[in-house]
Image: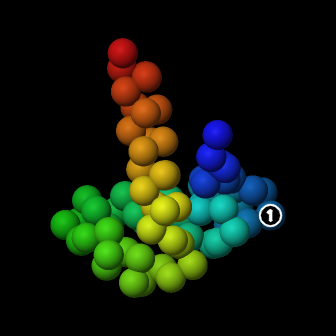
Amino acid sequence: MAAIIIVADPEIMNETPCFRGTRVPFKNLIDYLEGGHSLGEFLHQFPTVSKEMAVQALEEAKDSLLARIA
């Protein structure tokens, strides 16, 4: 099982869900993609987030959504 990538820590950004080990909110990734930017652009702007972390977070979000509507 892969490590949890998105965490909400009361000591970091007031419990805003962020990529583990960073201060980068997961919402930033969603906003970038929603705005028509590529994953590569997001990763360039937020170098503390690896491609693997971003992809895993998106897969977990997809799985969560599909489980909720199924």
SS for tag 1? loop
Which residue occupies 34% across, 63% down? 31
Image quadrant holding the N terminus, namely: top right
Residue most extreme to the top = 70
Q: Is residue 45 above or below residue 26?
A: below
From the viewer's perspective, is 7 left or right of 24? right
Which residue occupies 43% across, 23% down? 67
Q: Amino acid at mark 1?
A: Glu
Mark 1 is surrounded, within 10 Å at the Cα level, by few (under 14), some (14 to 19) or many (20 or more) other residues, namely few
> In the image, residue 22 lies at what x, y percent?
65, 72
Q: Can you identify the residue that label 1 sits on? A: 11
Which residue occupies 53% across, 72% down? 49
Write down the quadrant of residue 23 in the picture: bottom right
> In the image, residue 38 lies at what x, y percent?
25, 70
Write down the quadrant of residue 18 in the picture: bottom right
Q: Is residue 55 above or below residue 38?
A: above
Q: How is the image coloured?
A: rainbow
Of 35 and 64, nearer the camera is: 64
Residue most extreme to the front = 1
Examine the rendering and report whether any part of residue 69 can be seen: yes
Q: Is residue 39 above or below residue 48?
A: above
> In the image, residue 20 lies at what x, y percent?
66, 62
Image quadrant holding the C terminus, namely: top left
Q: Is residue 69 above or below residue 58?
A: above
